[in-house]
Image (cartoon, grey):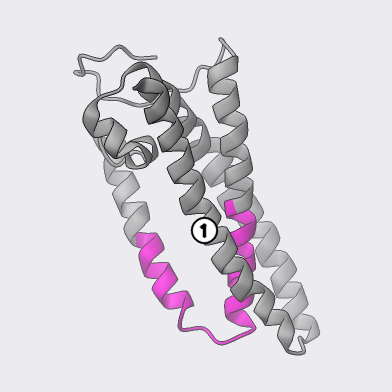
Amino acid sequence: MGTISAAWGMLGICLILGSAIYRLSLVGLDAFSQPLSWYHWIIALVWIAFMAFSEGYRGFQKGFSPRVAARIAYLKDNPTFLRLIFAPLFCMGYFHIERKRQIITFIITIAIIGLVQIVHLLEQPWRGIVDLGVVTGLAWGLISLFGFTAQAFLDDSFSHSPQVPLQSSDSNR
């Protein structure tokens, strides 16, 4: 049951991120269907670089991906029926995680939903430019998730915490 839980957790997260990458890429590429001014190009390049650093490197590679990889490995060793059914949500930290991290996860989710609503109001090419930056960060995140997950399963020195509550009866990894 542990292997199935871990596989479902990883697959579910890949489907969520992959779906967003695909949908936003289409909107982003649509920005090029009209003539762009020099300032559009400069803003696009700066925005994409900013999102690669802030969302891809700092958000995913330094935070989300190692934690999620640790939770996927933890899930393999500590499966329950609830964790199996909701494995992607468990791995992303929506439940059975330290309280502070859970609150942060929900706040970030609400903020992302709000930002998505705001970005939907933008006209092209601005919406496409914003979405291309987000795609860059998400793609970086997905690649880093694959790397950290492989490391979690193959490298005995993988030391990232799954951040499960201390009072848990489960053993920490």
Q: Quadrant of residue 132?
A: bottom right
Which residue is at the front of the view, 150 or 56? 150
Q: For label 1, count other residues whose C-alpha is less than 10 Å away and answer few (under 14), some (14-19) or many (20+).
A: few
Look at the image and give the residue range highlighted in magenta: 111-138
Q: Is residue 124 magenta?
A: yes
Residue tagged 1: 19
In the image, what residue type sits under mark 1? Ser
Q: Where in the figure is residue 147, as x and y percent of width and height?
A: 62, 31
Give the tally of numbered discs: 1
Placement of the N terminus among the 4 image quadrants: top left
- Left or right: 47 as drawn, with respect to 71: right
Q: Is residue 68 above or below residue 118?
A: above
Q: Is residue 93 visible?
A: yes
Q: Do we see residue 134 in this rendering?
A: no
Main SS class of the magenta portion in the image: helix
Q: Classify mark 1: helix, strand or loop.
A: helix
Q: Is residue 159 left or right of residue 75?
A: right
Q: Position of residue 9 (x, y in %)?
A: 41, 36
Q: Nearer the viewer, residue 32 or 78?
A: 78
- The one nearer the camera, 44 or 145, is 145
Residue at position x 54%, y 19% in the image: 153
What residue is drawn where x is 77% and y is 76%?
A: 41
> Relative to 9, does residue 117 appear above or below in the rendering?
below
Expressed as whole percent of the image width and height from the top left, the position of residue 112 reads 40, 61
- Quarter of the image with the C terminus is top left
